[in-house]
Amino acid sequence: MNMQHHLPHFHAYYQDAVASFSIDPVEMLAGELPRKQTRLVEAWAELHQDELLDIWSQMKSGEPSQPIAPLK
């Protein structure tokens, strides 16, 4: 199994680009997004860090999770 999947993380998509970000601390682990979108994703993740960690725990336990409001 990929070591990255042991870390709490999420995936961000923008057009044809995709990147994964760790949740604590919020930082890009892999992939690539344009600079502006990377900054927006990082800011969003910091605002929703507790929710992201809760969802990570739910998913690791096999429980369904609720979506978090996306950037608009």
Image (spheres, rainbow, N blue to C red):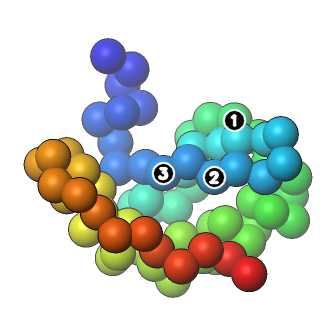
Tell me the element at label 2.
Answer: strand
In contact (CB < 8 Å): disc 1 and disc 3: no
Residue count near mark 3 (Cα–Cα under 10 Å), binned few <14, some 14–19, many ≥20 = some
Per the image, the residue denoted by label 3 is: 10
Q: Considering only vertical position in the picture, is 32 above or below 1? A: below
Task: Assign the C terminus to one quadrant of the image.
Answer: bottom right
Which percent across, then down, holds residue 48? Answer: 46, 78
Quadrant of the rendered structure where residue 41 is? bottom right
**Amino acid residing under circle 1:** Gly
> In 3D space, how far apart are the residues under numbered discs 1 and 3 (Cα atoms)?
12 Å
Q: CA distance from mark 3 to mark 2?
A: 7 Å
**Horizontal arrangement in the rendering, residue 25 relative to residue 33 (left or right):** left
Report x, y in % for residue 52. Answer: 38, 67
Residue 12 appears in the figure: yes
Q: Secondary structure at mark 1?
A: strand
Q: Closest to the observer: 21 or 58? A: 58
Q: Is residue 11 above or below residue 54?
A: above
Mark 2 sits on what residue? Answer: 12
Q: Looking at the image, is mark 1 or mark 3 earlier in the sequence?
A: 3
Which residue, given by chain and number where applicable, does mark 1 sit on?
Answer: 31
**Amino acid type at mark 2:** Ala
Amino acid bearing label 3: Phe
Q: Residue at x 34, y 70 (%)?
A: 66
